[in-house]
Amino acid sequence: MRAPQRRRVKIRGGTLGPALCWAVVFADIGTSVYYTPGILYQQFGSRASIFVVMTLVVFVLLTVKYAEVAWRYPEGGGVVTVASRAIHPFAGLLGGLFIIVDYYLTAALSALSGFFYLAAVVPGVYPYAVPLTMGALVALGLLNWIGIKESARVSLVFAVAAGVAQLVVVLAVIVSIGPAGVLHSIQQVAHGAGLTPPVVITGYAAAFLAFSGLESIAQIAPAMREPRRLIAGRAMIVVVASMVITAPLLTLFSTTLLGPKADPNQFISILGAQVAGPVLGDFVAVSGALLLIFASNTAIIGGYHVFVALARLG
């Protein structure tokens, strides 16, 4: 039986401007740089950055599309709303179920990874990582119960700190090794196993982890300030600028400058400590840990709006 047509919901303007929208998205997508280089290095060695650069074009195109989804479907719901209206409500249901699984995994694994990352600076945290993760998720739930704007403001603080730390590491490496060192790192990318079609496909798929999380902008559409088209566009421009500058260079430097004994789960903090001392390394570790924990916040926000969309569509 064909599902009944449902009336479009009128959504008034919210309170989130470009900076707060960027913070929510970056709290998810910005965490990828802390684990993607290590994953790629274990499989592809110094050629890891090739695959990150390959995904940049698709990443930019996706930011344009997700920004459009955010203003075309201000009721939120992301894949649920789009698939339901473009294909069939069952497609929206299926997409919603898939992304809910993703959000649950993101919430659990990101928070746990954050405390593991923090353990590099405070080793005493490690034995209590699981109960601390559970407590963090409860605290994030309470923060969102207070309000999405308050939640986004807290995310903004940690997103800015982590973004600054990533940029400082890039600049510190360039200053430390100089133009000749940068050129040498780029030349090392040419060394390694041949790029056969299976290797290219596998590397591309793994590198796309570096740019996962764009769906978040569509989920927070109901909370965006008017005009949504302008707000979403500006937020995604900053997202692109944040990732295009740091993700390829941090992958390049961490996979060509660090030795094989470096912990792939701590690549960026180890890189910062190696070129600028332990203070920068600790700052990267702490800011990265907090951003990983707040990636769970983005998953909570997204999960909430998916459930609302599923309920609204019956």
Image (tube, helix red, strand yellow):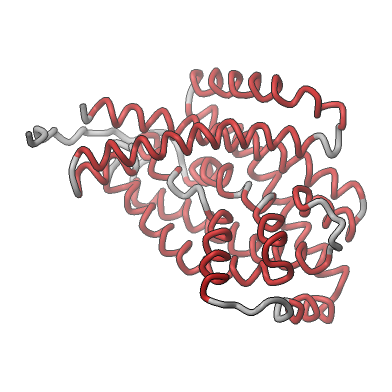
Q: Quadrant of residue 28?
A: top right
Q: Is residue 205 above or below residue 126?
A: below
Query: Residue sitting at 70 percent across and 63 percent down?
Result: 251
Q: Residue at x 85, y 49 (%)?
A: 280
Image quadrant where residue 223 sits: top left
Relative placement, left or right, of 252 versus 123 is left
Q: Is residue 160 above or below residue 247?
A: above
Q: Is residue 226 visible?
A: yes
Residue in view at x 74 percent, y 79 percent: 191
Indicate whether 204 appears above or below 75: below
Q: Residue 160's spot in the image, x, y percent?
A: 66, 45
Look at the image and tell me whether residue 220 can be seen. Answer: no
Quadrant of the snapshot with the C terminus: top left
Q: Nearer the viewer, residue 267 or 18?
A: 267
Residue 98 left/right relative to 139: left
Q: Position of residue 103 (x, y in %)?
A: 48, 35
In the rendered image, which quarter contains the N terminus? Answer: top left
